[in-house]
């Protein structure tokens, strides 16, 4: 905060004025831990660049300069008026203006206030403080215009409503429902998933997802649930708030699609433009579900590989949520005990140190190739399932298999 004050004081000393803006002011008044401090000023971007030694012109055409001080970044934006929106996402033209006009271009009243850190005063041209006290999310100006300018604001309204437990004002709500089917193609799916990620950081993620359905947005994003009733959506999302805080967003989203096959889950990940690592996690979580469903048919070899996976601890905590509460403690205890029994083998898997190695098979005249690979895998299964740590005893068992060359 001291660095942000320094920026304001520097601009003020040059005859300009500058305020903290938007979300920081809202959180400050709510006594919530504030997010990054954005600064709004009447200084042109060229002036901002000239006054600070380390800057990045991240959006100079829109009057936005990033100022870097002590490894911290502060977005400094010149007061502006957005002249025209063409793509339902961002203005194609802007004009520099006054703080009063700048406040009018912002999304919601509770985000439209400024704070003067020198005078320690709130500057409110949009009655944001009144709506904050009333716990209301209200568009600044005409809500239809606000959402046509930037369709993502519809999702943002619901995110803030769920986060702060605020009501969405009736005209704002009507406008969201009216424009819910216009989300695409104006908004990229990546931006929508970013909003999901922000929602998941606070309590009320389940509430936010349910609200998205009530406001017709969730079924726009996921057409496969368009025929569902609200009660069914609530039932499917029932466990989401019990998920561990570190659970990835996709784990909660998948609750909407309980009948999806693994291939459909992976396709959903690709639709959401998720990373390969996230797809890998979804694949592993699906494997875990199948293991638990068919627990008595899963051998120790499979469990050892499951426990050795880097996603295991997170996956087992998510899977445990799906176990009835009265049985959850026993479920976790049983897997802790099973891990202890298999610890030696799990450690070997993690260290890539199987009991039987290729050198052992070479001594038996097995040449490198497909057969050797098959025999090494079977040897590891024998070692883990029969708890044999002597490589030669494993090979004796291996010789009993049909694939061992006669």
Image: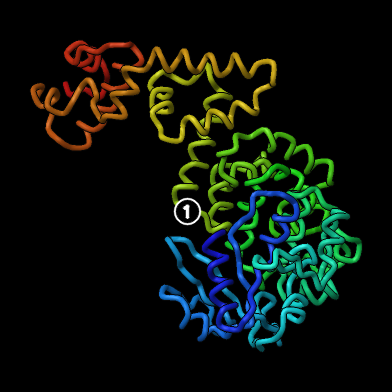
Tell me if residue 356 comes above or below residue 233 in the rendering: above
Q: Residue at (31%, 29%) from the top-left corner?
A: 350
Q: Tag 1's secondary structure?
A: loop
Q: Quadrant of residue 194?
A: bottom right
332 or 139: nearer the viewer: 139
Direction right: furthest residue: 170
Q: Residue at (76%, 81%) from the top-left corner?
A: 101
**Circle 1 residues within 10 Å: few <14, some 14–19, many ≥20:** few
Q: Residue 369 location in percent, x, y?
A: 18, 37
115 or 187: nearer the viewer: 115
Q: Residue 268 location in percent, x, y?
A: 58, 52
Q: What is the quadrant of the N terminus in the image?
A: bottom right
Q: Residue 309 location in percent, x, y?
A: 40, 32
- Tell me if 374 is positioned left or right of 75 in this view: left
Q: What is the quadrant of the C terminus in the image?
A: top left
Q: Which residue is mark 1?
A: 275
């Amino acid at each position: 905060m001291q660095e942000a004050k320094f920026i304001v004081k520097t601009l003020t000393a040059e005859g300009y004025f500058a305020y903290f803006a938007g979300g920081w002011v809202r959180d400050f008044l709510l006594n919530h831990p504030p997010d990054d401090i954005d600064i709004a000023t009447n200084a042109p971007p060229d002036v901002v660049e000239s006054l600070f030694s380390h800057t990045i012109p991240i959006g100079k055409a829109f009057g936005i300069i990033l100022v870097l001080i002590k490894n911290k970044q502060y977005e400094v934006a010149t007061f502006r008026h957005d002249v025209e929106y063409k793509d339902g996402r961002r203005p194609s033209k802007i004009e520099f203006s006054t703080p009063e006009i700048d406040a009018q271009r912002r999304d919601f009243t509770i985000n439209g206030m400024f704070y003067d850190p020198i005078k320690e005063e709130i500057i409110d041209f949009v009655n944001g403080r009144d709506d904050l006290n009333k716990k209301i999310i209200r568009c600044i100006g005409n809500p239809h215009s606000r959402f046509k300018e930037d369709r993502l604001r519809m999702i943002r309204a619901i995110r803030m409503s769920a986060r702060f437990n605020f009501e969405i004002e009736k005209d704002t709500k009507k406008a969201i429902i009216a424009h819910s089917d216009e989300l695409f193609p104006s908004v990229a799916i990546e931006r929508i998933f970013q909003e999901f990620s922000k929602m998941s950081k606070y309590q009320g993620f389940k509430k936010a997802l349910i609200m998205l359905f009530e406001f017709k947005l969730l079924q726009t994003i996921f057409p496969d649930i368009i025929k569902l009733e609200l009660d069914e959506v609530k039932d499917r999302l029932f466990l989401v708030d019990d998920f561990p805080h570190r659970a990835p967003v996709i784990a909660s989203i998948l609750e909407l699609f309980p009948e999806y096959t693994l291939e459909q889950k992976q396709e959903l990940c690709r639709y959401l433009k998720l990373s390969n690592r996230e797809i890998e996690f979804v694949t592993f979580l699906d494997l875990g579900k199948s293991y638990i469903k068919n627990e008595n048919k899963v051998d120790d070899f499979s469990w050892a590989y499951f426990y050795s996976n880097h996603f295991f601890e997170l996956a087992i905590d998510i899977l445990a949520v799906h176990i009835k509460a009265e049985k959850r403690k026993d479920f976790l205890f049983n897997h802790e005990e099973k891990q202890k029994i298999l610890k030696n083998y799990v450690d070997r898997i993690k260290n890539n140190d199987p009991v039987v190695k290729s050198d052992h098979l070479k001594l038996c005249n097995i040449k490198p190739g497909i057969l050797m690979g098959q025999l090494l895998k079977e040897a590891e299964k024998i070692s883990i399932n029969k708890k044999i740590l002597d490589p030669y005893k494993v090979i004796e068992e291996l010789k009993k298999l049909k694939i061992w060359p006669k």
